């Protein structure tokens, strides 16, 4: 292949796949980028009509705080999906990372040591990264479809959690440690809950990584056209593996906020979180086939899911037990809308 062709392919891989920036060109309205924010605004108006307390500061703060887990995990999922991958194991991975972290805390000193807590948090990040690395290597080196790989690891992580918990739950035994760790979820900084600050920081870092670095451009290029990206010299396998590692780290960060909330991990921890994370990503405008990634749209998608659930709880329109069904319907509708907008553009 000539150098001219390589240069042309590289441009196609790095620029041609970034449909989000193309759609945002002057004179063109990117409906897929705008749609989630319009949908959130409509839901806020609907919620105000459904219940007078919906727009109260306390309720909105609670909604934002509860959305933190899915929002953080969905940031990692944005990288995976934008690169053309998929991770169905994030819910089970959450349970496994939380379980191992609590077991580590329980094996240490029971005096509420800050060093022990710090070590446990670092270990959780490491376990999450290793879980993501495993998913990535099996997918890229083993050349197996990510759907199959992560479906398998979903069962593995869940089974390991049940085994570690001996069929029950894994709880933090030390009350001083619980007290020390409690502000990580229930605390605030200048009135802003810590989980909200956490997911905004993760989103900002994710946006910088995706939009402002060569790695982010490579992620979009790989998801847009894997063959062109490979011919352009982009290490496709390495890029995809790194996206899964990022996903594992995001899961671990979510765990750091989740553990102080309940102080325990069970076999049902993180159940169906993979559905919610993928739904948030798709609602946010990221193409499920890859090649487009929208971090802030993903955050908006996570907020939409929590707002929908909150409206269902505050009203009698639909039973709150049908939240999972509504979320499943949302992802189907989002895909139909996304496909319709693609045809128009």
Image (cartoon, grey):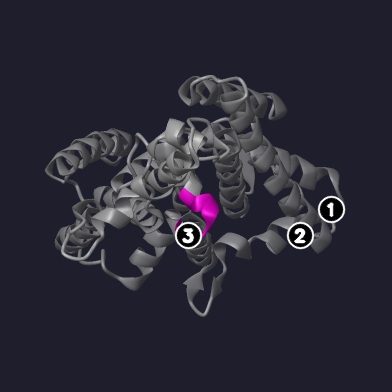
Front disc: 2 or 3: 3
Residue 203 disc label: 3
Instruction: Confirm whether residue 158 shows in the render.
Output: no
Between discs 2 and 3, the one toward the N terminus: 2
Instruction: Using the image as rendered, state which of residue 250 and residue 291 is in the foreground.
Output: 291
Q: Main secondary structure of the magenta part?
A: helix
Quick one: SS at disc 1? loop
Quick one: SS at disc 2? helix
Residue 91 disc label: none
Q: CA distance from mark 2 to mark 3?
A: 32 Å
- Image coords of residue 168 (percent x, y): 64, 29
- Image coords of residue 66 (percent x, y): 44, 55
Residue range corresponding to the magenta coloring: 211-217
- Image coords of residue 252 (percent x, y): 62, 47
- Figure check: 144 above or below 52: above
Name the residue at 34% across, 72% down: 57
Mark 2 — residue? Answer: 176
Q: Quadrant of residue 188?
A: bottom right
Q: CA distance from mark 1 to mark 2?
A: 7 Å
Indicate yes or no whether the magenta region holds residue 137.
no
Between discs 1 and 2, the one toward the N terminus: 1
- Image coords of residue 200 (percent x, y): 47, 64
Between discs 1 and 3, the one toward the N terminus: 1
Q: Residue furthest right?
A: 109
Instruction: Give left or right: position of 297 versus 145.
Output: left
Instruction: Confirm whether residue 316 shows in the render.
Output: yes
Mark 1 — residue? Answer: 110
- Figure check: 156 above or below 270: above
Quick one: SS at disc 3? helix
Q: Quadrant of residue 278?
A: top left
């Amino acid at each position: 292949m000539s150098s001219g062709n390589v240069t042309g392919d590289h441009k196609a891989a790095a620029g041609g796949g970034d449909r989000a920036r193309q759609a945002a060109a002057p004179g063109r309205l990117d409906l897929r980028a705008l749609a989630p924010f319009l949908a959130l605004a409509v839901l806020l108006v609907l919620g105000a009509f459904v219940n007078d307390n919906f727009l109260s500061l306390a309720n909105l703060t609670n909604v934002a705080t509860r959305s933190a887990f899915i929002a953080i995990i969905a940031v990692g999922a944005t990288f995976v999906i934008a690169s053309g991958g998929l991770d169905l194991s994030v819910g089970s991975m959450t349970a496994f990372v939380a379980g191992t972290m609590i077991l580590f805390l329980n094996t240490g000193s029971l005096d509420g040591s800050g060093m022990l807590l710090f070590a446990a948090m670092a270990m959780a990040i490491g376990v999450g990264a290793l879980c993501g690395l495993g998913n990535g290597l099996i997918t890229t080196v083993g050349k197996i479809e990510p759907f199959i790989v992560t479906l398998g690891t979903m069962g593995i992580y869940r089974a390991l959690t049940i085994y570690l918990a001996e069929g029950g739950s894994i709880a933090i035994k030390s009350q001083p440690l619980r007290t020390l760790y409690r502000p990580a979820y229930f605390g605030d900084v200048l009135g802003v809950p810590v989980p909200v600050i956490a997911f905004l920081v993760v989103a900002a870092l994710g946006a910088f990584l995706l939009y402002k670095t060569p790695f982010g451009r490579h992620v979009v290029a790989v998801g847009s056209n894997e063959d062109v990206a490979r011919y352009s010299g982009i290490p496709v396998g390495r890029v995809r593996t790194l996206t899964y590692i990022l996903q594992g780290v995001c899961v671990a960060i979510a765990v750091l906020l989740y553990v102080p909330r309940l102080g325990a991990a069970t076999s049902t921890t993180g159940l169906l979180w993979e559905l919610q994370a993928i739904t948030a990503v798709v609602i946010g405008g990221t193409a499920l086939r890859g090649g487009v990634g929208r971090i802030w749209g993903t955050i908006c998608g996570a907020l939409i899911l929590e707002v929908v659930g909150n409206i269902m709880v505050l009203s009698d329109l639909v039973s709150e037990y049908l939240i999972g069904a509504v979320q499943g319907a949302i992802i189907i509708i989002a895909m139909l809308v996304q496909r319709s907008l693609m045809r128009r553009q």
